[in-house]
Image: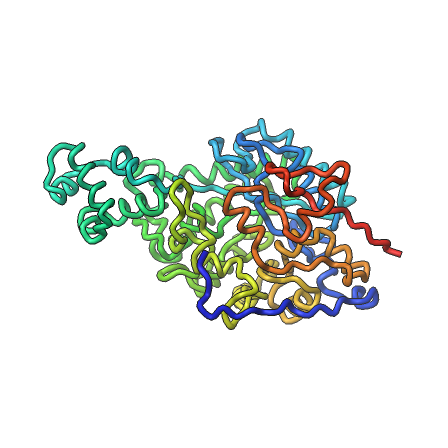
Amino acid sequence: MWKPPERIRHRLPEAQWPTLDDIQSALWFSPIRYRALDLVERTWVPAMVPWRATEQGFVTQDVIDWYRRFAEGKPGALVVEATGIRDVPSGPLLRIGHDRFLPGLRDLVSAVREASEGRTRLFIQLIDFLTIRRRPEPEKYFGRYLRITDTHRRGTGQDADEDVREALLALHAADDREALERILSPRELESLNQGFRERVTDLDQPHIRDLPQALPPLFADAAERAQRAGFDGVELHYAHAYTMASFLSALNDRDDGYGGPREHRIRLPLEVYGRVRERVGGDFVVGCRFLTEDCLDGGSTLEDSRYFGRRFAEAGMDFLSLSRGGKFEDATQPKVGRAAYPYTGPSGYECMPVVISDEQGPFGRNVEPSRSIREEIRAAGLATPVVVSGGIATFEQAEDILRSGGADVVASARQTLADPDWFLKVRKGLGGHVRRCIFTNYCEGLDQMHKQVTCQLWDREDLDEPGVTLANENRRRLIAPKWQVDEG
């Protein structure tokens, strides 16, 4: 994983936990209502992928236990992990691309309703992603995957395909990078060194060219299933390294009216939203998560995202949840046999910074860009709520963001994973009992390996306690221990 050169170790923000009297006037624990969005408080658990679904994308008991545990902290909103809208294999990630997934999703909704006593609004994040393959062994890449062309024949001086393959493999074995760069195209080199990855700009591929026609009905079908399953709303995933974010990115140079100028790049995201809204009606929450910045050379900037935010608000979205970075384009090289991971490069660091950081530090890194987008929306006379996240782990941080106009709702992922009860503890005046995240990204390291995600602060506690479910390797518990503090 990429690390900033400064290597400054930052202390956790000091926490002066509020009293019960303070809570009475706290904005973070006040309600917010806008269009279909209706939260009893402005605490928000953003989507986190825990790798607990079946290989076929079904809800498991471990999935239900994961979300029930967060619901016990009674946040204002809880967003279920990125859930695939297509009916295609995607490993142990939740899917919603067919009605057969509905029974499990209904059970998940029921568990959250019960655990939060109906207090928490439950949304599900809908995602589409393109094909990405693991970095191949050179022998397999040159011997099987590379499509031989006349360019390769001229470059190697060989005519027969097998001879061309052997010559290219020999150049690779000799580490003759200069020769390989002359013979192989940039995409071929990428497929060798990183693994093959589809792009929304691969217009020579019919299924990529047809994405603007295929995606709106797929998202609409998924949103309707979410509505039928009992969710309060959906969050359209327009962020990070995935299909919709790639349409928004300034790197999208499609020439079919869906790329190039920002007015064209936002076209498909707006068409997806329009089809979803048409399907589910105005009483069902529909928002999106998108990036304040791509954090890439040539990628979308804050000015782009100010424009996107205003257009999404004008279209009628019920909320806008903001993240940053997390792209494939600058991901570090994976080991052979593993796929590229979009949170390993500089843009990935911007998404999930750690305590050893640059001068800016890891806490609230996305607040000022979010404030700028919110100001653009307010200047247009719109009141669409903005949700901010990123290194927020104290009541003071959240309250300052809300009171200064940095956002309307404050979300926290890693701190909530560290202590699913922390909202409840703070609201009861028991903030001193909060288990505080130390921002080392232990959890993110598990995610990168596609292992069941846990927190190092609790995953080795009381492993022999009755009823504790262990991770696949039987050395970690999957769910945080119950809160045992006497509330008085």
Q: Is residue 376 left or right of residue 19?
A: left
Q: Nearer the viewer, residue 88 or 10?
A: 10
Q: Is residue 195 left or right of residue 81?
A: left
User: Compared to 181, does 390 lie above or below?
Assistant: below
Q: Residue furthest right?
A: 488
Q: Is residue 240 left or right of residue 163?
A: right
**Picture coordinates of residue 455 (x, y %)?**
63, 50
User: Compared to 82, does 326 lie above or below?
Assistant: below
**Picture coordinates of residue 176 (x, y %)?**
21, 50
**Picture coordinates of residue 204 (x, y %)?**
28, 40
User: Compared to 285, does 26 lie above or below?
Assistant: below
Q: Nearer the viewer, residue 135 or 38?
A: 135
Q: Is residue 250 left or right of residue 417?
A: left
Q: Residue furthest top?
A: 100
State the quadrant of the N terminus: bottom left
Q: Nearer the viewer, residue 472 or 18?
A: 472
State the quadrant of the C terminus: bottom right
> What residue is rendered at 46% in x and 46% in y?
271
> What residue is rendered at 64% in x and 29% in y?
103
> What residue is rendered at 61% in x and 44% in y?
80
Can see residue 371? no
**Picture coordinates of residue 189 (x, y %)?**
27, 47
Residue 346, picture quadrant? bottom left
> What residue is rendered at 50% in x and 44% in y?
449
